[in-house]
Amino acid sequence: MRFDRLWRHATLATLAPERTGVGLIADAALAVTNGRISFAGPMRELPAAACAREEIDLAGRLVTPGLIDCHTHIVFGGERDEEFALRLAGVDYADIARAGGGILATVRATRAAADETLFAAAAQRLRALMAEGITTVEIKSGYGLDVASELRLLRIARRLGQRLPLGVVTTALVAHAVPPETDRAAHLAAMTGELIPQAVAERLADAVDGFCDLIAFSAAEIRAVFQVARRHGLPVKLHADQFADGGGAALAAEFDALSADHLEWTGAAGVAAMARAGTVAVLLPAAFHCLREHNRPPVAALRRAGVPMALASDCNPGSAPVLSLLTVMNIGAVQFGLSAEETLAAVTREAARALGRLHDIGTVEVGKRADLAIWNVERPVQLIYWLGRNPLHARVWGGQ
Ligand code: DI6
Ligand code: FE
């Protein structure tokens, strides 16, 4: 039996769904052939004749699926540090948004930036994520807010996926904010009537997203957006219940959303609806931290109801200026009460599920893409125990 690459003596966290916890296998072997996992199991089950072009002894190092950041707004122009300073001085995020700052400040800077500037800045941020073992990232548009600008951001996101050794899943964030040059109804009409069909025609969007909240769009407005997405065969996801329980989680579930994200204010009805629909809860602890929120997502209720929980960076220049998923994992565990095992599953298997990609990535199982992170630690909890320590030893993307 000849593989392309063979790792021996790994501590393997497979995250395979039928195994308990993170599916730990001590003294494991792992092999890839043509970029896919072709063996994953105990060393003693490796055929004696197994060999490979490249053989590596991992001396007990932990191997996990490559990490997945399933919610980012990583393509944007400008910075919002002045707004951050205002918030430190006690000004409210929502008040900044209502005064024309917030998302609209980033929209102005993004529209003014050249393609190459946006591409280079996003690529640099993605490299920071990759340095922590991220092998797939979701990228949303949403800082263009007119049809041409939104398409431009989606094209840049696609190009990032073509140029960097990284999986990129794109999302058209079609209901993010109302741009200054138009009104709500006209804006939503353009986003649903023009942006969605054009994004579909150019295959630029893997999903459709919206921002359902007091400072953004109502459940009725989002429902109309989701109906158009459904007609075009695009799965949906939703920024839901971040600042109030506006029924966002239940609305997402009603449309069989891949995920409902944030959920700080989601109540029992939202949790039950998500459980029924199989919608993933994507928790965003960096936004919670940076906005000094107090209400925590209902983690215990989500767990009881069997709702899968993912964690993501929400990387954006306003509410979550963060380029470290390991830091996000620590905050998620400490502030939201996830166990070490849940935290690792949240950025691997459950993040893959939230992207509709669990058939291909997110666990270490034979047949899946060989996207792996190899760590200089022995136990999963050591990934999140220290803040600011990056124990990545090697990152493998498609077997390379
Ligand atoms: N995601 C978003 O789209 C908004 N909040 C969030 O978590 C706005 C981000 C921003 O302030 O630019
Ligand atoms: Fe977001």
Image (spheres, grey):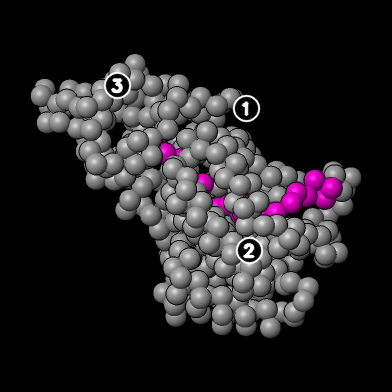
Q: Nearer the viewer, residue 270 or 367?
A: 367
> Do tag 3 and tag 2 residues touch (Cβ < 8 Å)?
no
Crowdedness of circle 3 by 10 Å Cα count: few (<14), some, many (20+)?
some
> In the rendered structure, are the residues bearing label 1 and label 3 in contact, judged by CB atoms less than 8 Å apart?
no
Answer above or below: position of 44 versus 265: above
Specify the segment rendered in magenta: 65-83
Q: Is residue 340 depicted above or below 73 in this figure?
A: above
- Identify the disc placed on residue 56: 3
- CB under 8 Å between callouts 1 and 2? no
Q: Nearer the viewer, mark 1 or mark 2?
A: 2
The residue wearing badge 2 is 142
Residue 178 higher or lower than 165, as above or below: below
Residue type at tag 3: Ile
Counting residues from the N terminus, which is met first, the one under dot 1 or under dot 3? 3
User: Which residue is identified by label 1?
Assistant: 388
Tell me the residue at 29%/45% (across/down).
Answer: 368
Disc 1 under 8 Å from ligand 1? The reply is no
Viewer-nearest of discs 1 and 3: 3
- Mark 2: is the Cβ under 8 angstroms from ligand 1? yes
Q: Is residue 341 magenta?
A: no
Residue 81 lies within the magenta run: yes
Position of residue 342 measured from the top left corner of the image (x, y, whole percent): 47, 40
